[in-house]
Amino acid sequence: MATLLSVNVGLPRDVPWQGRTVRTGAWKSPVPGRRMVRRLNVEGDGQGDLAGHGGEIRAVLVYQVQSYQFWRKRLGRDDLTFGIFGENFTVDGLPDDEVCIGDRYRVGEAEFEVTQPRVTCYRVGMRLGEPTMAALLVAHHRPGFYLRVITEGHVQAGDAITLVRRGPGELSVADTDALLYLPERDPAKLRTALDIPALSPGWQQSFRELAAAGQQTADKPGRPGFRPMRVARIVPETADVSSVYLDTADGTPLPEARPGQYLALRVTVDGTTREVRSYSLSSAPSAGGYRISVKHEPHGKVSAYIHARLCTGDLVDVAGPRGTFVLEPGTRPVVLVSAGIGATPVLAMLHRFAAVRDPRPLWWIHTAHDRAHHAFADETRALLAQLPGAHAHIYYTAETPRPGEEHITRGRPTALSLAALGIPADADAYLCGPTAFMDDLGGILRDHGLRPERIHTERFSALAAVNPGVTPTAAVRPHQPSGLPGTGPLITFARSGITAPWSPARASLLELAEACDIPTRWSCRTGVCHTCVTPLVTGDIAYTTPPLELPGPGSVLVCCSTPTTEVVLDL
């Protein structure tokens, strides 16, 4: 029979780490006597990052003494005291390869249900002083697991642990963990996982995405690297927006593009400095060409070059198409929402709608400053005229509509005005524009009833950072790294507009991005969780720590990779 050996608690504390401050509850220690376990945690315990730990679904973390014995031998350490793995319950028995999701156990006065494996997180490595610990837990199938509290009550060291009910599907913790983090997934186990009600909502969503990815590829990366393309013509759309038509320079077929994807352009703006920027395709690709549409930004080096110096017949280096902001097939209604130059990717989607006479109900909603700055007005009107079931509404923030223009409103979209458009709650929405615009409109659509996973957004700038547990600081504009410049190959962060030479003093591409104050996304920092996966526009890399599962084609895990050639990242 399994036994509770130790009850461990600890309140969140601020821990210095790599020049930053991390708020974490990973520092836990054994406590004597009885402890009350309530719905959210053990008495005296707390979590610093409730997005990944704690809460009703992850109230209690369990780890086994048998795993302690394994790690003491594997790591050559004799200082692994109970609680050092961040667990609340240290137990004798309950191995990860036997305990199943949905199992229920009685411990003392309380009853618990197994909800998910431990989240692979860098903080367990912080606590142990072993940076690769998150990867090791997964690779050796010893993650530990979380419990939900079914019945509150007191527990104490020495209590017997009794199995009350076996979980449906009998999918073990170790198998569930491997299903998310390791390659060669068993489709049958994936289907089993989706049918277990006790599995936490976060893991259910991850498995739904994996199942969908097994049926279709959401992002089809273009041919790796750059290829020369010729400027066929340049067409002004408004005073500050021009469309650039690009043709193949060598007659070879173009990579297939999906509506909503973008190209990366590399140009030499001053005779020596090469700059890389990404621009959405603004129409359906033809047999031999692409179209992008570029707004002249006041301080944009590349957009200024395109508007002032790029000429018909010039050659530019192009990589792509790529991107996951794409129009998906289906039968649900579709809402295309944009502001300003954000119209470009959703305009490509509208072109696809018209080309195939897509029967889905469609809402086209666009915001512009005024009539003079309303790019593609005639083009969208002609496309919408080919779709009898389409609805269009335009907002001008600085101009009053003319008589008879019932589809135009002075102002900006509001909850009241969007509700009046009759958008169905089961629609798929695609939003592109300034960040504040997308945040506001996304919130309005969610309040209207649209499910969050059906609201897709495209951001031209760097994505919002994901740095779990790190105490926020004032935002800093991306910049060159401090100190002596590196002597290695150039690394370009395309979304952030930063190019810096590589230095072997950096442990990874992620560390270079952080040195430039570029917003980054990571969690495990050891190549397990894939939070840091980043499109690789061009170049070659090597992994310092081999990932447990390689990312998809055209992508790289920046947390554990270094460059072997010049590299361009979509970051």
Image (spheres, rainbow, N blue to C red):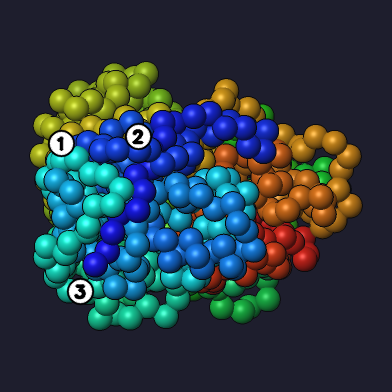
Residues under labels 3 and 1: Cα distance? 39 Å
Q: Is residue 526 visible?
A: no
Q: Residue at x 82, y 54 (%)?
A: 504
- Secondary structure under tag 1 reads helix
Mark 1 or mark 2, earlier in chain: 2
Mark 3 or mark 1, earlier in chain: 3
Classify mark 2: residues with Cα within 10 Å, few (<14), some (14-19) or many (20+): many
Q: Residue at x 61, y 79 (%)?
A: 252
Q: Nearer the viewer, residue 456 or 189?
A: 189
* Left or right of 457 in this view: 442: left
Q: Quadrant of the N terminus?
A: bottom left
Q: Which residue is mark 1?
A: 448
Q: Which residue is mark 3?
A: 170
x, y percent for residue 17? 63, 37
Identity of the amino acid at label 2?
Asp
Identity of the amino acid at label 1?
His
Q: Residue at x 48, y 61 (%)?
A: 68
557, above or below 215, in the image:
above
